[in-house]
Amino acid sequence: MDYSKFSGSGNWVYLPKMGESGIFHIKKMSFSKSTDERFNFSKSESVTENGKTVTTHEPILSPDTGEPFNLQCELENGKTLSVSSFGAFMQVFKKGDVQDGDKIKVSHPKKGEWLVEKLGKDSKTVANIEDETLPF
């Protein structure tokens, strides 16, 4: 059997696991909705039912669409970075002011802690984005 046609690497990549770090060269970011609710942003809530505490996961809804959502980043290497943790999204992307064209190093030293360092910007990507937004 010829296995040379099959690649072991998929098109999806994820933020680093606890204790690890990774470098991502972001071409373009966008919000999307997954049909699998596990991949959309959610928040955990503890509810007491019949004297027992149960943790539920409620979706976080997009302020624009009112639908569950996640962040997907098209990377320079052709892969897609899927971000489904709202905490990671807020700490890495919002707090780090990550934009299209940024090359970033993301570290996840311990639970609930994310660090981002900007390593550079791709001027080609930025120029293309600016061209798209021109009104003429």
Image: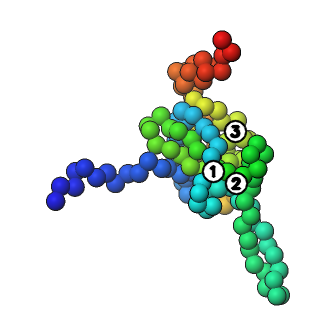
Nearer the viewer's eye, disc 3 or disc 2?
2
Looking at the image, residue 74 lies above or below residue 68: above
Nearer the viewer's eye, disc 3 or disc 1?
1
Q: Position of residue 41 (x, y in %)?
A: 68, 55
The residue closer to the viewer here, 113 or 66, is 66
SS class of the residue under badge 2?
A: loop
SS class of the residue under badge 1?
A: loop
Q: Which residue is mark 2?
A: 68
Q: Residue furthest left?
A: 1
Q: Residue at x 63, y 50 (%)?
A: 33
What distance separates the C-alpha of mark 3 from that of mark 1?
23 Å
Q: Residue at x 75, y 78 (%)?
A: 54
What distance separates the C-alpha of mark 2 from that of mark 1?
6 Å
Tell me whether the residue at label 2 lies in contact with that at label 1, contact meaning CB atoms closer than 8 angstroms.
Answer: yes
In the rendered structure, which disc, 3 or 1, sits on the residue that comes first in sequence?
1
44 to the left or right of 81: right
The residue closer to the viewer here, 52 or 59, is 59
Crowding at dot 3, Cα within 10 Å, few <14 / some 14-19 / many 20+, comes out as some
In the rendered structure, which disc, 3 or 2, sits on the residue that comes first in sequence?
2
Looking at the image, residue 128 lies above or below residue 25: above
Residue 19 in sight from this viewpoint: no
What mark, if any, has residue 33 been given in the picture? 1
What distance separates the C-alpha of mark 3 from that of mark 2?
23 Å
The amino acid type, in three-letter code, at marker 3 is Gly
Q: Which residue is mark 3?
A: 96
